[in-house]
Amino acid sequence: MTEPSQEEILELIWTMEEETKRVEKDSLINKIPFPTAEEKLNVLVNEDYVKIVDSRVELTKKGRADARLVIRRHRLAERLLNDVLDVKEDAMDSSACKFEHILDEEVTASICALLGHPVTCPHGKAIPPGACCEKVNKDIRPVVMPLSELKAGDKAKVSYIVTKYHGRLDRLSSMGLLPGVQIRLHQRQPTYVIQMGETQIAFDSAIARDIYVRLV
């Protein structure tokens, strides 16, 4: 079991491998944000998480497995913060770094399912799949999805709305389309029409992609 500072080193090696393939020890040491960087790296070597071949740093099988979990938690946390909580870019990474050390596998799987088993983080980097992702095949629909993926007749609850256009968000809110509200998709063409109580609302596909819902 690694401590948070060791997890961050494993995560750093993983991300450097993604960028450069080869991780040089000196370059890694310079990027580790701890005063005892080389000492912590040596601990990981002694505990068989990392090996150093000449000047090259490599993850062992054990280290890669741990790094994969840290990367998965971090990038899922970024998706949650970005897509659901609308946290700004400058705060997203630091918050995700805190999340990655406290999330257990059950909570991580729940977040993954909530987000519909995303394959990339907001920056386009791959999210390593978990066991929950492997159980989901193309015939199974995600727990939360854009309204645009509903079929006519589907009933769902609004989970959250993601849009860069505040005017659009204000318009939807003024119509009562808020998280927790139950809707039914009446039609998909030529425009999306939803039934919300006694009210019908029509909008185009761009708006439908901004509204995330959970099937009921």
Image: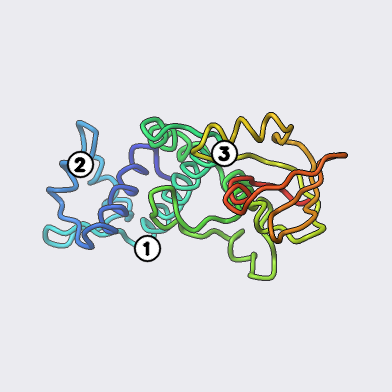
Q: Residue at x 61, y 40 (%)?
A: 161
From the image, state whether disc 3 or disc 2 is nearer to you.
3
Identity of the residue drawn at 53% across and 55% down = 118
User: Would you say 211 lies left or right of 62 here?
Assistant: right
Camera sees residue 106 = no
Q: Residue furthest right?
A: 198
Give the residue pinned by disc 3: 84
Q: Which residue is mark 2?
A: 31
- Give the alpha-carbon distance from disc 1 to disc 2, as whole Å: 23 Å
Few, some or many residues within 10 Å of mark 1 (<14, 14–19, 20+): few
Q: Quadrant of residue 50?
A: bottom left
* Residue name at image x 76 percent, y 51 percent: 215
Instruction: Kindly report the distance in space between the C-alpha atoms of the residues bearing marks 1 and 3.
Output: 34 Å
**Vertical comparison of 30 with 130: above or below:** above
Label 2: how many Cα within 10 Å (few below 14, some 14–19, many 20+): some
**Which mark is in front, 1 or 3?**
3
Camera-side residue of 213 and 118: 213
State the image coordinates of residue 119 (x, y, percent, origin top left): 49, 58
Q: The disc labelled 3 sits on which kind of residue? A: Val
Residue assigned mark 1:
61
